[in-house]
Amino acid sequence: MDKARFLRVYANLPIKIREQVVLVIDDGSEKKPISWNVAYVEIENETALGKKIFDKLVKLELI
């Protein structure tokens, strides 16, 4: 995972946009809306959810 890639995009987002949902993670039993701020925390802490979020952002070509 290339955190620098995510951080470059995140740093250039307006603060109000960071509060908005960027994607939804569907893990079978429930759907989890993920904001840019949540993505930042998860990716920065290198959690399993952070890896899923990062991979999905790459797939969606958002980073």
Image: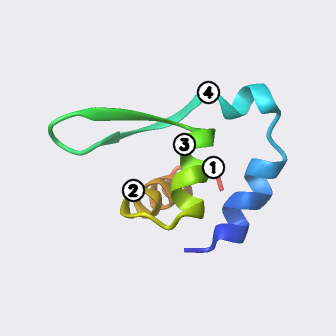
- Tag 2 residue: 49
Q: Which mark is residue 37?
A: none
Quadrant location of the N terminus? bottom right
**Alpha carbons under labels 1 and 3: distance apart:** 15 Å
Residue pointed to by mark 1: 62
The alpha-carbon separation of the residues under discs 4 and 3 comes to 10 Å
Q: Eyeballing the image, is 48 above or below 56? A: below
SS of the residue under disc 4: loop
5 in relation to 16, above or below: below
Quadrant of the frame with the C terminus: bottom right
Q: Residue at x 74, y 49 (%)?
A: 10
Residue type for callout 2: Leu
Q: Amino acid at mark 4?
A: Gln
On the image, numbered disc 3 is attached to which residue?
38
- Structural distance between the alpha carbons of marks 3 and 2: 10 Å
In the shown orientation, is residue 13 left or right of residue 5?
Answer: right
User: How many residues crowd mark 1 within 10 Å: few (<14), some (14–19), many (20+)?
Assistant: few
Q: Is residue 14 left or right of residue 2?
A: right
Distance (Cα) linking label 1 and label 4: 14 Å
Are the residues at dot 4 and dot 3 in contact (C-beta closer than 8 Å)?
no
Mark 1 and mark 3 in contact? Answer it, CB < 8 Å: no
